Amino acid sequence: MKVVTMIIVMVVAPATVAAMAWFYTDDSSGDGGKGDSPSFPISDCDDVDTDLALRRRDPAIHNLPTALPTQSPTTATATMTQRNRRKRRRINENTTTQPPPSRAPTASPTTISVVTTTTVELFGETYHIANTTVIDRAEKGLTGTLPSEIGLLTALTKIRLWGNHISGNIPTEIVALTALKDLYLGGNDLVGGIRTELGLMTNLDWLSLWGNTFFGEIPSELGLLTQLTMLDIYNNQLSGHVPSNLCDNTALAIIRVDCHPEQFAVQCVCQECSCH
């Protein structure tokens, strides 16, 4: 005779009702359970899944849990808090942080090497800046232009370069020669207008520019040369008239200009004018 014992355990959780059945078959007849299986109306377990009920009638299923774990509201809140913390930690670990913008490299101070020039080379000759007072290379067959480096020889008082083949124009750097008294550049191949900057060389005593190819009018700035005693500008291609302030220069003894050529002529009403 088979005795079937059925134990139904009901576990009530929030918003959930679970029913589980555990069946134990006692074979008192000693037939090893080979007798007819007891009938069990599935309809009596309306809250249990039909398939689950059929499978649990199998005596091979053992050790079913007798109750589902439950959590108190406090425990549930703590569990949720831990989950949120782990989630935030994963987000922080997976977030790629951008490195702070690097500052532009600061350029190291540039070291400027100051090269002190003590000499100047003009037409193949070397001149010391500190003690060169005279350049006398007249009628030496010099060619090329007058280098701008001549303005570095600030101790010069006389330049005699007449009777050569120097071309180009007078460099503006020559105005730095404030101690210069005599400037002889006649008989060369200089071209262009007479530099107005020459009027700033107030120590000039003799200005000789004859026999070149200067053109245009005589600049009135030459009237600022109050110490000028001789002005040679003939045999050029100058035109116009001699500025009146040159005529008013009491120190000026003679002005040599082209007064008679048919093509180029300078009008001069100064008593100091000497026509060529």
Image: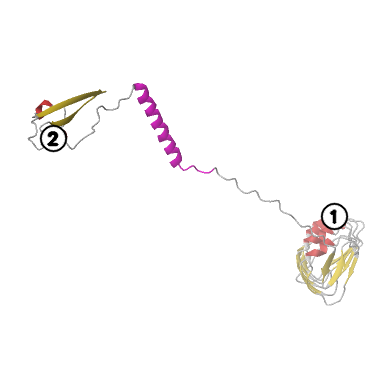
User: How far across and down, in percent of the image, does residue 146 sit?
Assistant: 79, 68
Label 1 sits on residue? 224
In this picture, is 75 found above or below 138? above
Label 2 sits on residue? 54
Q: Are marks 2 and 1 in contact (CB under 8 Å)?
A: no
Q: Is residue 196 magenta?
A: no
**Amino acid type, mark 2:** Leu
Residue at 45% of width from left, 38% of height from top?
Answer: 92
> In this rendering, does residue 220 appear at all?
yes
Of the pair 200 and 232, the residue shown nearer to us? 200
**Range of magenta residues:** 73-99
User: How far across and down, in percent of the image, does residue 6 sit?
Assistant: 15, 26
User: How far across and down, in percent of the image, does residue 182 sit?
Assistant: 89, 64
Q: Which mark is residue 205?
A: none
Quadrant containing the C terminus is bottom right
Quadrant containing the N terminus is top left
Residue at 42% of width from left, 32% of height from top?
Answer: 85
Of the pair 137 and 17, the residue shown nearer to us? 17
